[in-house]
Amino acid sequence: MRKMRTQRAIAVLASVLLIGGVAACGNSDTGGGGSKDDGKITMGFSQVGAESGWRTANTTSIKESAAAAGIELKFDDAQQKQENQIKAIRNYIQQKVDVIAFSPVVESGWDTVLKEAKDAGIPVILTDRSVDSADKSLYKTFLGSDFVKEGRLAGEWLVEQKKGATGPVNIVELQGNTGAAPANDRKKGFGEAIAANPNLKIIASQPGDFTRAGGKQVMEQFLKANPKIDVLFAHNDDMGLGALEAITAAGKVPGKDITIITVDAVKDGMQALADGKFNFIAECSPLLGPQLMDLAKKVHAGETVPPRIETEETTFTQEQAKEALPNRKY
Ligand code: GYE
């Protein structure tokens, strides 16, 4: 009995492998980019890394959505290095995938490799972060958040909070990795929002690379160098969470002695907000997978897609975090 079941299992496995193999062959034989007849879409995806809770949720969303959409996903984690992303994209071009999607770790320096993809006839979709290429024909669309707006919403909330403040309000800023779109843009939006208030002053601003370890380390330096810190603006939850340790170790109460504003609203960040350790979060949604797969199908079918698709987002106060937390998916 057991033997028969094993034989059947082997037969099923063999046929699955055979069908899979045929599908895979069909894909590469017809040349990937531009092959529109085998039905199966192969996507090469180059991810930034695994630096934050946001990134982990984003990766899960992409993998799950690809499986649900029947898209074969080739996935590479670049460990926050542009050279790794360029290498991965070149591999995808060589493998003749149907669509390339990626989240560029920094904004600049993509023109050459994007041109190679274009010349190979492989459409590129930017997701989460954008590039600063002047030639917009190098990619089909950019799906992601408005990072300037996130920074602005964070700054506007602070302006409102400190409305009656007479003395100086000293702000320190933990930036994302140098050259990344969300680091550049969140800094810009926040700076613009507080600009008209001369008593709101950014006294220190350094990259913490979007990681908890980076946030903790840089916050320690900030605390050592500046006896009076009133506000921390961290470009993501993870750096804010790392900074909590530094603040507590310095004998200060996060959320009270130092007002903490972050971006993302992942579960751990929302928990810190609900617990009163953070004061405000501008949301940035990592759940880009379903829209990305939809776009991949459209560009593969030769349909025109809008050049920019913006993610819908909100903001959270401590009270709103308490309400939203039980249903938070990531
Ligand atoms: O805010 C941060 C992550 O690019 C929007 O990258 C993303 C950012 C996100 O490391 O947590």
Image (cartoon, grey):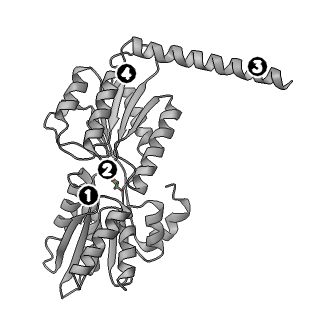
Picture residue at 36% right of the left edge, 76% below the top: 246
The amino acid pointed to by label 1 is Lys
- Upstream in the sequence, badge 4 or badge 2? 2
Q: Is mark 4 on a helix, strand or loop?
A: loop
Callout 1–callout 2 Cβ contact below 8 Å: yes
| Picture disc at residue 149 | 1
Q: Mark 3 points at which residue?
A: 7
Regarding mark 3 in the picture, which secondary structure is present there? Answer: helix
Residue 163 relative to residue 1: left or right:
left
Q: In this view, does 266 lie to the left or right of 205?
A: right
The quarter of the picture showing ligand 1? bottom left
Label 1 – label 3 distance at C-alpha? 60 Å
The residue at label 2 has a CB less than 8 Å from ligand 1: yes
Q: Residues within 10 Å of mark 1 (few under 14, many from 20)?
A: some
Residue type for callout 3: Gln
- Identify the residue under disc 4: 301
Label 4 and label 2: CA atoms lie apart by 25 Å
